[in-house]
Amino acid sequence: MTIKNVLSIAGTDPTGGAGIHADLKAFSAMGAYGMAAITAVVAQNTRGVRSFVPLDPSFVGEQIDAVFNDVRVEAVKIGMVANAAIAEVIAERLHHHEAETVVLDPVMVAKSGHRLLDDDAVAAIRDTLVPLATVITPNLPEAAVLLDTEDVTNLRQMEDQATQLRGLSCQWALLKGGHLTSETVSVDYLAGPDGISTYSSPRVWTLNDHGTGCTLSSAITALLPGHSVPESVDPAKTYLQDALVASDRLNVGQGHGPLHHFHQFWPRG
């Protein structure tokens, strides 16, 4: 079986828990060959984001072209885009290269609450990147921004929003319910052509949850070539859950630590 080549277009994380660093780890753990085009260099750690510097949009496009002009790319994951100009370049270059399998994780706010994009980027993400996506994977605050509405407070509202998200012209929408802490389980809704599917996982109470969204979307990206969205979401969710449970084996930072991306490979103790 040929190993799949997958590309992440996202920002950095010096402590390795989120962004490009988490994407490449998740790609590898899922058995795919990972590549990266950087959109922004971020000064952050487990306690928060200090600042970020977006790269020149044309240079982001050059990175994407360099990969596609040389490598067979079977899936693309888009994370932090930083601003509208970068979002527009990503959309234009992916159109040009006829990218067919695209996962959009609309990164807007870090785990610490710090914003990771300029105000003008929201409309560009909604108008240029969402329609490109095979599946989008927003959390509840990101969904509220995309839909220009309030955060949901219960599962019924969440299910409604999943359907509304798919109405933004993506093929599938996976709405993640980790922020709905009133629930004893974490519930995600996947809206697709045939309706809504529900995924429930026991809530893992840990501070080591930095990069959960990046990790899940990247795991889905690595699994999508040759599989349907539901076939990819299910094992990706299992991988994320196990990585959260095993995260206490790591000792990284003083804030929200990373997941254990290689829990199934590294020896215990």
Image (cartoon, helix red, strand yellow):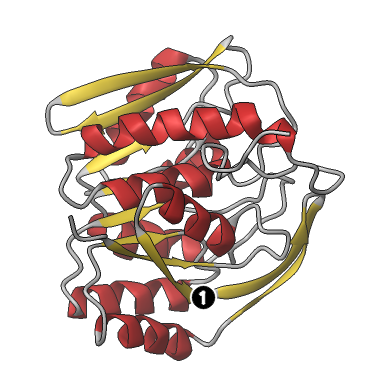
- Residue at x 74%, y 46% (from the top left corner): 112
- Residue at x 80%, y 42% (from the top left corner): 251
Q: Determine whether 43 is above or below 180 in the image.
A: below
**The one of 120 and 41 positioned closer to us in this rendering:** 41
**The one of 203 and 124 positioned closer to us in this rendering:** 203
- Residue at x 56%, y 35% (from the top left corner): 243
Residue 151 visible in the picture:
no
Q: How many marks?
A: 1
Q: Residue 40 location, x and y as percent? A: 59, 74
- Residue at x 56%, y 44% (from the top left corner): 261
Crowd class of label 1 (few under 14; some 14 to 19; many from 20; radius 10 Å): many
Q: Quadrant of residue 156?
A: top left
Q: Residue 83 location, x and y as percent? A: 52, 71
Residue 158 visible in the picture:
yes
Left or right: 50 with respect to 197?
Answer: right
Q: What is the quadrant of the N terminus in the image? A: bottom left
Q: Quadrant of residue 212?
A: top right
Q: Determine whether 39 is above or below 217 in the image.
A: below
Q: Amino acid at mark 1?
A: Ile
**The one of 242 and 80 positioned closer to us in this rendering:** 242
Q: Residue furthest top?
A: 184
Q: Residue 210 location, x and y as percent? A: 66, 44
Q: Residue furthest right?
A: 254
Q: What is the quadrant of the C terminus in the image? A: top right
Helix, strand or loop for disc 1: strand
In the picture of the structure, the residue carrying the numbered disc 1 is 38
Left or right: 15 with respect to 149?
Answer: right
Q: Residue 102 location, x and y as percent? A: 28, 58
Left or right: 226 with respect to 19?
Answer: left
